[in-house]
Image (cartoon, rainbow, N blue to C red):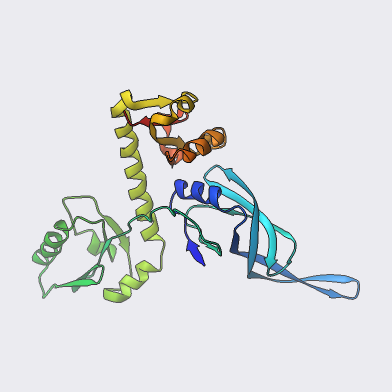
Amino acid sequence: LVELVPENLTDLWYLYRNLKEKIVEVETLRKKTIKRGDEFIKGKTKLVSLKIKIEKLKYLDEKIRLGGKIIEGADKGKYHFFNLSINKKIKIFDKLENLPKEEEKDIVICVVDKNSAEIFNNREVKKILAKGREIEYYKEIESFLNKISKPILVCGPKNITGKIKLNKEFFVDTVSHGGKKGLKEVLNRQIINKIFEKISADKEKKYIENIFSKRDKLCYGYDIESELNRIKEIIIPSKFVNKYESLLIKAEEKNVKIKIINNEYSDKIEKFEILGICWY
């Protein structure tokens, strides 16, 4: 059993290319129907798990559509179709080769109130006490956080987090508790995922800007097919994947890296539709 959560569009492309004939488990809503005489009465809706052997796949814009016969669960023998998108978990009961590398998601969380700040950095915890101080208290927190190179989330009451100023970008959230209770409150929300979505988007924008600084190594559109032997990477906005699907598959067979980018950040690439980066 493998549990996967696609973190980006390139992960979705990998699953699109590798899930055919695989057995997966998904959760879906089913409404129980009871027969009373000649009458069918619909009961409560509940979440059920289905095991499906994938037969059909379609790459849609920023998600994939999968379908196949239910081999275990409600409506066994019938067909079920579902969408898989970024950050949606799927369980796979077959071995997959060359899984995409998991994105590093390491963040420092500082939970602060007027009495103390607890800074959680993996398993290390740094505690800073106010001890009746105010200006010095916040300066000590700032000094410690400014030395950290990882992304930082500062959370606490609004009137407290607003007093912390760092010499770099950091993220802020509001919690109603201090210490470990505040940490638990943050971890139970989607704020961490949203932070890494923003970090990933910023990296993607910089990556695209960097590509165009190497114009002498770029080729475009269907010209890529004739240059496949010297291309090391292909970059394509999600909206053009269907149009160039056969070309992408040929490229993968030649071990060319495929990177699919969010349509939102693709304005520089859109007029070319697809870019190839050459080795030389």
Counting from the top left corner in percent of width and height, residue 4 is at: 48, 60
In the image: residue 239, left or right of residue 219: right
Front one among 124 and 111: 124
Vertical side of 240 occupied by 122: above or below: below
In the image: residue 81, left or right of residue 92: right
The residue positioned farthest toward the right in the image shown: 38
Q: Can residue 83 be seen in the rendering of this structure?
A: yes
Vertical side of 101 occupied by 28: above or below: below
Counting from the top left corner in percent of width and height, residue 275 is at: 42, 30
Residue in the image at 28% along x and 66% along y: 157
Counting from the top left corner in percent of width and height, residue 241 is at: 53, 37
Counting from the top left corner in percent of width and height, residue 49 is at: 62, 69
Residue in the image at 71% along x and 68% along y: 31
Vertical side of 202 occupied by 182: above or below: below
Residue in the image at 23% along x and 70% along y: 113
Q: Quadrant of the C terminus?
A: top left
Image quadrant in which you'd find residue 195: bottom left
Residue in the image at 50% along x and 46% along y: 13
Q: Can residue 81 be seen in the rendering of this structure?
A: no
